[in-house]
Image (cartoon, helix red, strand yellow):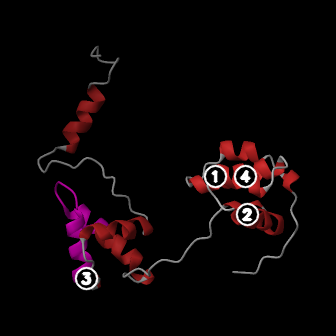
């Protein structure tokens, strides 16, 4: 990441109260930092602000310095932290996703369970997870949601269902 250069931002550049009320970032710390910057903008000292938020005044000083040097983005948002590397190699993500899709399409009814995906990962990609529930972050990373469509009954007739939908529309056939 390139080193940021200080720019000496002023507290008068933003309406922190309005930003705090409209902040869509899910972290509560982001809003808290905006409220702190708003109070600094109002002329309050870090020693006055800190007890209201249960913080040390030094924390307020650090926030003000980060804003002054690097601007609002660097001051209020946390940096992304590195986590453990995925057991499944990044080059295998697409193949793993495709394999899950293929397995789901082969099924006549029902859906894949985490246990089924756990088996695919272990047997075909030599990736062993302690529990099948550990797969959910991996599925999220490869762009798969665990929200699934309603399963199809093995004896369902798609043509009969389409004919029914065309024939019996609410308001058109007299049925409401």
Q: Is residue 16 visible?
A: yes
The disc at residue 53 is 1
- Residue with the mark numbered 2: 63
Image quadrant in which you'd find residue 135: bottom left
Q: Position of residue 41 (x, y in %)?
A: 83, 50
Please name whichever residue, 108 or 15, is drawn nearer the observer in this view of the structure.
15
Secondary element at tag 3: helix
Span of residues in magenta: 101-123
- Residue with the mark numbered 3: 124
Secondary element at tag 2: helix
Residue that appears at 62% across and 66% down: 78
Q: Nearer the viewer, mark 4 or mark 3?
A: 4
Q: Position of residue 73 (x, y in %)?
A: 72, 62
Secondary element at tag 1: helix
- Residue with the mark numbered 4: 49
Residue that appears at 33% across and 57% down: 146
Sooner in the amino-acid sequence: mark 4 or mark 2: 4
Sooner in the amino-acid sequence: mark 3 or mark 2: 2
Circle 2 residues within 10 Å: few <14, some 14–19, many ≥20 = many
Q: Position of residue 111 (x, y in %)?
A: 22, 57
Q: How far is disc 4 from disc 3 in space, using C-alphas?
A: 57 Å
Q: Above or below — where is 21 with respect to 113?
A: above
Sooner in the amino-acid sequence: mark 3 or mark 1: 1
In the image, 166: left or right of 154? right
Given the current orientation, which residue lies at the most extreme bottom position?
126
Label pair 4/1, CB-CB below 8 angstroms: yes
Q: Above or below — where is 83 with respect to 176?
A: below
Q: Nearer the viewer, mark 3 or mark 1?
A: 1
Secondary element at tag 4: helix
Q: Which secondary structure is most common in the magenta stretch? A: helix
Sooner in the amino-acid sequence: mark 4 or mark 3: 4
């Amino acid at each position: 990441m390139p080193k940021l250069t200080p720019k000496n931002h002023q507290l008068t550049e933003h309406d922190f109260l309005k930003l705090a009320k409209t902040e869509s970032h899910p972290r509560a710390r982001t809003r808290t930092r905006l409220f702190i910057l708003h109070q600094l903008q109002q002329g309050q000292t870090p020693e006055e602000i800190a007890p209201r938020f249960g913080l040390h005044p030094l924390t307020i000083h650090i926030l003000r310095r980060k804003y002054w040097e690097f601007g609002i983005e660097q001051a209020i948002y946390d940096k992304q932290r590195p986590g453990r590397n995925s057991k499944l190699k990044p080059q295998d993500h697409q193949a793993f996703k495709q394999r899950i899709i293929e397995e789901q399409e082969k099924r006549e009814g029902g859906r894949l369970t985490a246990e089924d995906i756990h088996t695919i990962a272990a047997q075909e990609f030599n990736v062993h997870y302690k529990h099948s529930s550990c797969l959910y972050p991996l599925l999220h990373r490869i762009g798969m949601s665990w929200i699934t469509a309603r399963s199809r009954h093995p004896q369902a007739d798609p043509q009969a269902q389409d004919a029914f939908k065309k024939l019996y529309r609410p308001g058109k056939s007299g049925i409401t």
